[in-house]
Amino acid sequence: MLSSLIKNRPLCIALTVGSLLYSTLFLAGICIYECPVPILFDARCPGCGLSRSIVALLHGDILSSLRWHAFTIPVLLIFFVIGIACILPQSGIKHLSSFIERSEKLTKWPYCLLILLTAYSLTRVALTF
């Protein structure tokens, strides 16, 4: 999963630049994206609060960050690894992807994270009804 993604440098660069652009505009108070989930389904988006959670975390307010969205730290760690993959030489990317691939196979952490995130998201959506 993540090991395959970081092998694709153009995709890593696009994700990193897009994330940094969105974050910078969000911090400047400019909203360039309106989430379609509440508009289409009249329900809270599973990712709702992630941007505010990141801002709270950047201000050192960990408790507020976790209240806004519990998966902010894992999401930021994944985006950090993707960002690192943008600047590593090809040999570094090969070593990093190999390390991550071994950890994914050994621990199955991407599946665990996905299951937990899905349960968390469904719970959040269910609580809005």
Image: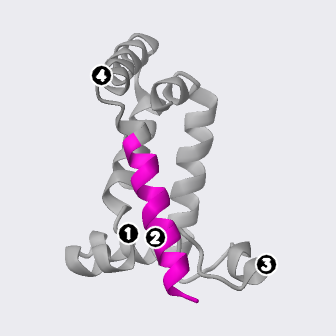
Q: Residue at x 27, y 81 (%)?
A: 64
Alpha carbons under labels 1 and 2: distance apart: 6 Å
Q: Residues within 10 Å of mark 3 (few under 14, many from 20)?
A: few
Callout 1–callout 2 Cβ contact below 8 Å? yes
The span shown in magenta is 112-129
Indicate left or right for 11 with 108 as reference. Answer: right
Q: Quadrant of residue 61?
A: bottom left
Q: Which residue is mark 3?
A: 40
Asked if residue 120 can be seen in this view, the reply is: yes
Look at discs 1 and 4 and give the one toward the viewer. 4
Name the residue beneath numbered marker 2. 50
Counting from the top left corner in percent of width and height, residue 5 is at 54, 30
Q: Are marks 3 and 4 in contact (CB under 8 Å)?
A: no
Helix, strand or loop under label 1: helix
Query: The disc labelled 3 sits on which kind of residue?
Result: Leu
Residue at the spot 39% in from the left edge and 35% down from the top edge: 84
Viewer-nearest of labels 3 and 1? Answer: 3
The residue singled out by tag 1 in the image is 54
Front position in the image: 28 or 58 = 58
- In this view, the residue in front, 47 or 58, is 47
Q: Nearer the viewer, mark 4 or mark 2?
A: 4
Q: Which mark is first along the chain, 3 or 2?
A: 3
Kindly identify which residue carries mark 4: 106
> Which badge, 4 or 2, comes first in the chain's sequence?
2
- Residue extending farthest to the top is 91
Query: On the rendered structure, is 43 left or right of 103?
Result: right
Hey, what amino acid is under mark 2?
A: Leu
